[in-house]
Image: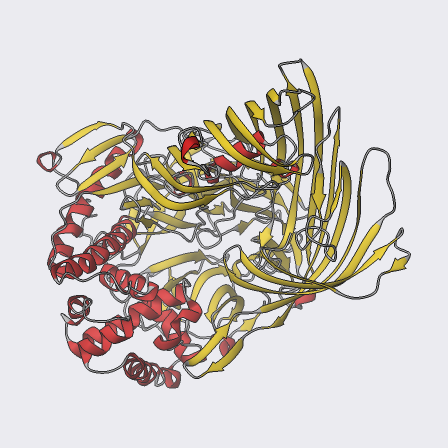
Amino acid sequence: MLRYYGLILCAFIWCLADPYAVSAQYLNFFGRNKVQYSEFEWKVMQTEHIDLYYFPEERELAERAAASAERSYRSLESQFSLSIHRRTPLILYSTHQFFEETNTIPNFLPESVGAFTEFLKGRVVMPNLGSYHEFDKVLRHELIHVFTLEKIKSVLKNHRKPLRVGPPLWFMEGLAEHWSEGWSSEADLFIRDAVLSGYLVPMTDIRRISGSFLMYKEGQSFLKFIEEKYGDDSIELIFENWWRGKSFEEIIALTFGVHLKKLSDEWVYSLRKQYYPFMKEADSPAVITTVLTRRGLNIKPVAVPDEHDPTRDAGMVFLSTRHGYEDICWAPLEGTEKQVELLVRGGRSVDFESFHFLRTKMDVNKKQKLAFVSQSRSRDVLNIWNLKTRKQDQRFVFDEIIGMSSPAWSPDGSRIVFSGLNVAGYSDLYVVNTENGALEKLTNDIYEDNEPTWSPDGKVIVFSSDRADGGETQGWHNLFSYHVETGGIEWLTQGAHNDRSPSWSPDGRWVAFVSDRGPGLDIYLLDTARQTYQVTNMTTGVLDLNWTPDSRSLLMTCFEHFQFQVHKLVLPDSLTPVETPEKIDKSLAFWDPIRIKESQVKTTAPYKNQYSLDLAQGGFIALPQSSDIAFGGGALFRFSDMLGNHHYNFLVSNSTETTSNFFKSFNIFASRMSLARRLNYGFGVFHLNGRFFNDRNGLFDERRIGAVFLYEYPFSQYSRLEGNFGLLYSIRDRPFLRDPDGKAELVTNYVSYVKDTLMWGPTGPIDGEGYQFSVNHLTDIRRGASYSTTLLGDYRRYFRLSNRVAYATRALSISSFGRQPQIIRFGGSWDFRGYPFRSLKGDRMFLVNQELRFPLLDVINLGFPFGVMSFSRIYGALFMDVGNVWFDDNFGTVLGSFGAGIRMGLGGPLVLRFDFARQVTDNLTNLQPGLKFTFWFGPDF
């Protein structure tokens, strides 16, 4: 969390400067940690257009990235009719695990984020996932963002017009998808389902799904439609007319002579004409299969063999979000949702931070031992889970492997084959002996080798790989066989299509796989004679395959109605071959990747910190805390280096009320934050002079000079130790800390332990656990006197009663003691509902909150003369609070309140809250008359 404190270091300084502001410790900064587990020696490679930042272990990947970037640059210059004169920084990470540690942005990066373009410094930041084609496509996608903004800027500059409208998000992402990969089977799957299931969103209403994957694909489909209707240069015409319109809708109308709504209606109609006839030839997954799950998102199923009869099943294991997190669950194949059992909790502990939900399969052997991959800190772990004891038997971590996926047991249960991604960014097959932990590397090349499956006799491993012809340029994946004894690799399928998710049947007759060689993603079988059979022709598609133990049925993930669910398909008694045996051209060689030529590299040098301005903001500057201070006529500046590891923050203001005190009344903050290593730290100095207020002294004038040091050590993404140490010299216009001259020289020490496994909903946390325990000590070094010690304990627990209903509870206690304890103030919407804001005070307090959170209304549409205004979900709350605040040992009586509230999320942490409550006093025996109403902005506790 320290990475968020750079701009608010002044708040810590203010808290340090006011030794009686308990808000200094009552800020309660929960939140997970972005941990720098890895330390790299960064280098910079300069090519014609790119400054590429990489570390030595990924040098070959960097050479490929540089060649790919320059190739895309030349192509996009032609496509946009634009030359960019500034250089583009490209920061490269060889794995997604390393990418998640980046400091270029403070946000956490989920696995669904494949790269991003950051606009403060124009940086493109991206990981490698093992596939060269996917890497090339994502890099081009991000460079299109760079060119899009530069094109708009260039057009406006040429016409001497200011920016009146920015590009909508759907246009930005849709164009990047359209011009980076073209139309794919994945895009077709989502749009086809949206049309056939009736949830396709018109472009006039696309803000309703802003930021979603569906928005990306709808934007891509709409721009594809425009190019097909108006020609290849139609999108460039949109850019050329950017200076003419006051809105994006007006730009579209000026370019094509029709309104966006008309274009959207034509686009929707064209899609219906394209996909509706498909219903005549294809089958819905729900019609030809048995749907085994319905609640949440459920994928990657694998059957569990019966311990006594391996041809019978004992249920299945699958990945699920039914509990809000990514979990591993068990269920019977012939059962109900009520019989689903939670096996392994994900997203709550260091051992199981992530299950790589969409990237890796699981497998179960005859002894009912489940092999699966989880992320733990900076790398992946191969876990062996005993389904009989419901406990973990083994875990394997390998120094040379960062990422792992799709483990598969050998028939005798002694070895596991899996796909591994090393620090250089190469994806290869490995085998681990589970008895002694010995690791063997099977493949060693630049191709993506994934989803291995073992033959029942243990002699052959079938896997999917992009080493196929067209793998580099088109990303085609075919099936290959690896012979365990010889190490030889042979083609099993070949062609301009994607063959994935192979699964060898237990009886050895078939290799089942998913292919897009037809109109959709369907199931195919390959027999020992290499004869191919098409099993399904679905309206949507299949993503994962695994056989049941009797070799008669397949478990799979099907996508339909915008849901991923587990299905079971019973194979028909007879199958008709769809073609002659697979035609294999053995003369085809595996492809070699392009790399940047030495002549194209201008320089390669070690990385050096070079700082540039991120933020310059002037105007009125205020620091809201438990005490009041406001600085007028100030300016805030922030600088950082290219990797975002080091930050400088400066704030200058003046609080003078007369010209004679102008120079004396300057207020200055200067700080430096270092985030490069696991231990994050920052330090700053300050000078404050002005009028202050606190509960003990009221309004007073004071001059404060001091320094502060902050630190944070994360143990994992869930827990950390944090604190600060400060020095303060203060001169007041009245006695201060028993000094008649109002002078004090103070030292503050603050330390806190924080843990956070919370899951957030639209208005606040809805699941998980969070707690904070902190100590703050104030000492006057001038007299060697200890003035106060403050202890804080804050525990929060959230229970998800259903997908949309949660029960929240919090227990908070603060105690300050010593010569002059800190004053604690509370009351109001954030803590004790029903009591006026900060109306209760003392030096000790406790508070217990309980709240039931539930949805009230999904959508509200209000009609106005100028149009319809829509509001997103409105949530309700029923709450009860119990607590008290007192001085010394004068406890008084317990207070309480109960009531209800309404919440509406306005985006991010901005939540509109309206509460009405009744007070209960005198040890909860006296119900006070009347309701207390409170409006507030901010998330639920």
Image quadrant in which you'd find residue 479: bottom left
Query: Residue at (71%, 36%) from the top-left corner?
Result: 823
Image quadrant in which you'd find residue 936: bottom right
Let me know if residue 135 appears in the view: yes
Q: Is residue 798 left or right of residue 494?
A: right
Image quadrant in which you'd find residue 537: bottom left
Spot occupied by residue 278 in the image (x, y as percentages of width and height): 36, 82
Let me know if residue 539 appears in the view: no
Q: Is residue 269 left or right of residue 257?
A: right
Q: Is residue 104 left or right of residue 913?
A: left
Query: Residue at (34%, 35%) from the top-left corner?
Result: 640
Q: How many marks?
A: 0
Query: Residue at (64%, 49%) from the top-left corner?
Result: 768
Spot occupied by residue 499 in the image (x, y as percentages of width and height): 34, 60
Spot occupied by residue 576 in the image (x, y as percentages of width and height): 37, 75
| Front in this rendered view, residue 516 or 216 | 216
Q: Is residue 350 above or below residue 732?
A: below
Spot occupied by residue 349 in the image (x, y as percentages of width and height): 60, 42
Q: Is residue 545 left or right of residue 23?
A: left
| Front in this rendered view, residue 208 or 63 | 208
